[in-house]
Image: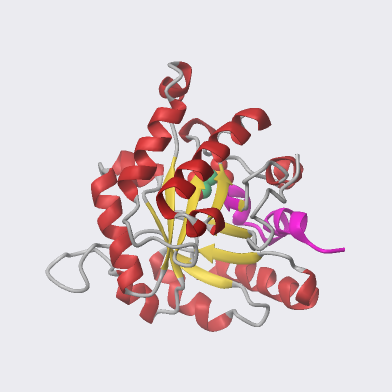
Amino acid sequence: MSSNAPGAASVKPMVVGNWKMNGLKAALSEALAVDEALAEAGATVGSEVMICPPATLVMVMSELSGKGGMTVGGQDCHTAETGAHTGDVSAEMLADAGATAVILGHSERRADHGETDQLVRQKVVAAHRAGLVAIVCVGETIGQRNAALTLDVVSRQLAGSLPDEATAANTVIAYEPVWAIGTGLTPQVTDVAEVHAMIRSRLRERFGEDGEGMRILYGGSVKPSNAAELMGVDHVNGALVGGASLKAKDFLGIVDVYRQK
Ligand code: 13P
């Protein structure tokens, strides 16, 4: 299958590392190694490369990197700009620390913190208010997949989690089947193709041209050995990578899929 789907030729792929709750200062060397490799590869990189570390490392990582064009994102934000919300971080704070994007509605936040589509949509609005790109996650559980509910669930999450003002420039979708996260399991490429095609048609229906250009990432056990196959599926415009983004060597093995040789 070709990644050059009609109308998608101008979509620049994106490879995003989600460090989750991993990474002390010592781990910054991995991010710097990624940035340095990108600097060496120069114009041949072929994708936008981003790491989303824990909030504690956003500022220092964004200050230390950038030589190779690597960008830095957050993993969540509050809906409000400021206020009495102990322990929370606002989109404006992430932007102030040097982030250019924020992951929202990750299945771990939906499960651990009871985040609903409505709350995710409010967070997307907050991200846009602060000038951040919102990376909005959707995906079914194994029970939902076994009950043949995947397309319904993802379609509902997509409709509920995106505000009307989402554009190709300020919003990225990440399809992450919950059962594929951190398990080493991945869907069949035909299943990935089916879900990504459905997402694309929903985005087109709702956002027109912008829906055509909005990037749709695949996430869930992406590693160097399966990245080429997964990234080759129609309407897969990059990857959201968990475990394999913690080591520069593995992450660069995935980034390499888009390298223009
Ligand atoms: P893994 O790549 O570790 O499966 O995690 C995927 C993920 O949840 C990225 O957001």
Q: Is residue 24 above or below residue 156?
A: below
Q: Residue at x 65, y 55 (%)?
A: 8
Find residue 219 and report its image quarter. top right
Query: Do we see residue 64 in this rendering?
Result: yes
- The residue drawn where x is 62% and y is 46% is 235
Determine whether, in the image, residue 97 is placed left or right of residue 63.
left
Image position, residue 240 (x, y; %): 56, 51
Q: Tell whether position 128 is magenta.
A: no
Which residue is rendered at x = 47% and y = 17% of the image? 146
Image coordinates of residue 248 in percent, x first then y, are: 68, 61
Per the rendered image, the range of residues in magenta is 239-261
Compared to 44, does 254 lie above or below?
above
Q: Is residue 71 left or right of residue 42?
A: left
| Colour convention of the picture | secondary structure
Of the pair 258 and 250, the residue shown nearer to us: 258
Looking at the figure, which quarter contains the N terminus? top right
- Looking at the picture, tell me which residue is in the foreground, 189 or 64: 189
Name the residue located 35 percent from the left edge and 59 percent from the top edge. Answer: 76
Q: Nearer the viewer, residue 136 or 250?
A: 136
Quadrant location, the C terminus: bottom right
Give the total number of marks visible in the rendering. Answer: 0
Estimate the x, y position of residue 253 in percent, counting from the top left: 75, 55
Image position of 145 with respect to 2: above or below: above
Q: Is residue 245 magenta?
A: yes
The answer to which image quadrant residue 202 occupies is top left
**Vertical relation: 78 (above or below) 161:** below
Identify the image quadrant of residue 16.
bottom right
Q: Can see residue 115? A: no
